Image: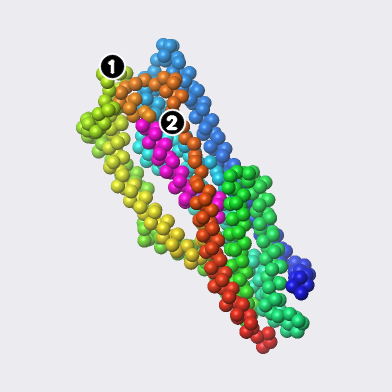
Amino acid sequence: MLAQIMKYEWRNLQADRMPFAVAAILGLAIAYGAANGSNWVRFQQSNIDAALKEQSTRMSSIRAEMAKLNAGEKKVSAFADPRLPQSFGRNMGLHYVVMPPAPLGSLAVGQSDLQPYYFKVSTNSKETFVNNDEIENPVHLLAGRFDLAFAVLYLFPLVILAFSYNIVSAEKEAGTLALALSQPVGLGRLITAKVVLRAMFVFAVSILISVAGVAAGGAALSAEGALPRLLLWVGVTVLYGAFWFVLAIGMNALGRSSATNAMVLAGVWLLLVVIIPAVLNVAVKAMYPVPSRIELIQAIRVAGEESTREGSKLLARYMEDHPEMAPAGSSGSAPDFGTLLVALNDATERKVRPVLARFDHQLQQQQQFVERFRYVSPAIVAQSAIQDLAGSGTHRYQHFLAQVDAYHRRWRDYFVPRILRKQQLTGSDLDLLPQFTYQQEDNAAVMWRCTQALGSLCVPLILLGVPAMLALRRYRVAG
């Protein structure tokens, strides 16, 4: 009986061209979003490749110049001598640290267009290269990018509601509901057949086009953990869509007209997808305001000026704290500027540390607040899960920053002793330079967070589905 109802309902949908037109619009939006996501991933990768190529070319040039300087074929100033560790480690031999796009990065641009995905590490304080200036068009950053996640989170529910807002009311208004129920079929089974057919059609269009677009865009589906993440993404999409179907059934079960159903469901979509996330964003920024970037830059500038005025006192204090780094003798070619700069950087970092600690604390409080209250809207839960699976969310970026911090310490630990001891670099020293290799976030941690999101999406399904089915039992077919 269920199959026969679905077959009859499919004929009804074929007779009405509008559902197919709406599905076609959704398919085009999803394809466009997948293409945009793939283009963004390729843009990121091309920038990373260009940066690493520039680094390789620069290192080859430095090696050649060091050979000429050692052979006496060329003379340069101390600030342009790559053999001096302070010149090499501070500006000439800078190395890139990069966070490559995740295997499924094209699923969601997320925050990756706002957060730098590569840095040039030097012996200066970390703030000088981490808190660099943004060169992206601010209008583009404000508007965001139309990606696959946007199509799923915003347009997908609208299409579902367009397919199901009058799933019962239209039959009642046309006078065919009583006729259909005169057959040996209950209202619950009739609605189930209608919803299953529509869900199969909408999910097939959305998921198949999404997966095809991501695969065609060059996603590394063979990478470790990529396939399970893709399956989790399908699960998040299906449960998110199921929520809107159940919501539409519940609204139909109240017995209102089709026009009323459409207005109420559109209002709920606006509330859950637009208003609540916006209010949550405003609330978290009001409750846990992050110090402005201007304040951070000003603090770095003031700390640098204060450290410069103290000058030799800082150097003496630094050498007292690090006697093992004192130069063995005074026969070095490095200028005093290099050793003084080490002390200045150390003092500046100590003075800026409270501002950075307050900044990090407020960001952590914001993240915890969002994590705590994200369950008020399925859209927020789905968005955080999709960004997590795509590798464009907060967790992966914080994981990257921790690796940047560790590599910066290794870089300075390599050069600072040589700067203080006035040792010249050789070709063998370049072979031993610290290298950066991005370590992917633990796949099990990502899976666990996304599994929690799946469970969170199941809760509103149950809370809405049970009352909706009970309401359908009391539905007045006539009158």
Locate residue 200, reporting x and y percent.
Answer: 69, 64
Residue at 59% over, 67% down:
243
Asked whether 127 or 428 is in front, the reply is 428
Q: Main secondary structure of the magenta part?
A: helix
Q: State the CA–CA distance, disc 2 to disc 1.
A: 27 Å
The residue that label 1 is drawn on is 331
Badge 1: residue crowd in 10 Å (few <14, some 14–19, many ≥20)? few
Mark seen at residue 434: 2
Q: Is residue 309 left or right of residue 361?
A: left
- The image quadrant that residue 26 belongs to is bottom right
Answer with left or right where residue 292 lies relative to residue 139: left
The region drawn magenta spans: 385-413
Rendering coords of residue 228 (x, y %): 60, 51
* Amino acid, disc 2: Pro
Secondary structure found at label 2 = loop
Q: Position of residue 265 (x, y in %)?
A: 58, 72
Q: Does the rendering let one see residue 267?
A: no
Quadrant of the image containing the N terminus: bottom right
